[in-house]
Amino acid sequence: MPNTIKKQYKNSLIKNITYTAGFLYITICILTHSKISLYYALLGLNLWYEKMIPTLLPFMIISGIMVRMNLTEMFTALIYPLVRPVFRVSKNFCYCMLIGFLCGFPMGARTVADMYERGSITHREAGLLLAFVNNIGPVYFTGFVLPLIERKLILPYVSGMYGIPLLYGILLRYTVYKDINTSPLHNTRSTDGGLLANIDASINAGVSNILTLGGYMILFNLFNMIPHIILGSPPKILSPIFEISGGLTLLGSSCPIYTLLILPFGGLSCIAQTYTCIKNTDLSIASYTLNKFVLTGLTALYYLLWYILSPDTFLL
């Protein structure tokens, strides 16, 4: 057997053994610590049912209908004159931006993937969009996060959460992605069946996506039981790294600066869900993750400057 094949076989064997041991350990933990595992599974399930379904599913369905019926360019007609001089991009690019910022994660990634698969945006446009539009949604941020950390001011936090990605997107557009062609594309896939057929397809796709999101939320919240069992108490600092919603619920208002810095990263569950959205394309999850780290660093710089320039108002 050639050395290369032996090495590949060895690496594959080690990986399989590692995965098997890891999931076997999780299974044992579920069986031996049923109360702890039930707590974290229910935490993910409740957050999915109470927060994600009502806020995301309607947007998923409506956006799916608009994409399938090629209505995105008309939808963005009002704001396109404001976006085009800054980004020099198409109306379909503008639509992805709008949905990404207004609806938040994972609608940003889902919309980008849908538009790219239908030929409405190019590979380079999709890569640029993924770098800055797939963030925590404003309804979630202002309605859940800010009340949770008990902050009095609103504008500085909203500016940091959404102004930084927007400026980062502009910077990337004129540096890394300066080669993007500004000529508009048109959908290459025809829309069949009329309104009712597209509503049906969008509902099916939306329900499938929201169920997948729920599975990820339950699974990654469940991972919190491992450090809980090892340490003997809930892993409040580690929890948002696994799954952002459940983690922030556990963390509460105890560490607001940490909460604000972990939000741009989004947690491992968000990265896994983004991969689910783009897995049928040739878009890079590694590039997406790298940009998340960059945005986290830029957010840290933002709050550092706020502390230096106005320490009296810092984190009010």
Image (tube, rainbow, N blue to C red):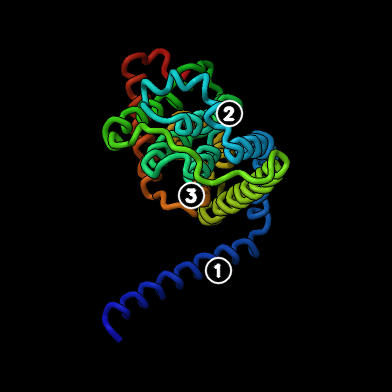
- 79 versus 118 height, above or below: above
Is tag 1's residue or tag 3's residue first in the polypeptide sequence? 1
Q: Secondary structure at mark 3?
A: helix
Going by the image, does 266 lie left or right of 176?
right
Q: Nearer the viewer, residue 57 or 12?
A: 57
- Quadrant where the N terminus sits is bottom left
Q: At which x and y percent is residue 78?
A: 52, 19
Tell me the element at label 1: helix
Q: Nearer the viewer, mark 1 or mark 3?
A: 3
Q: The residue under label 2 is which amino acid type? A: Leu
Q: Name the quadrant containing residue 68.
A: top right
| Residue at x 40% of width, y 40% of height | 292
Which label number is shown at residue 278?
Answer: 3
User: Which of 156/75 is in front?
Assistant: 75
> What residue appears at the point 32 percent right and 15 percent down from the top-left corner?
309
Which residue is pictured at 45% across the width and 27% down the height?
A: 161
Amino acid type, mark 3:
Ile
Residue 6 visible somewhere in the drawing: yes
Q: Which residue is under mark 2? A: 148
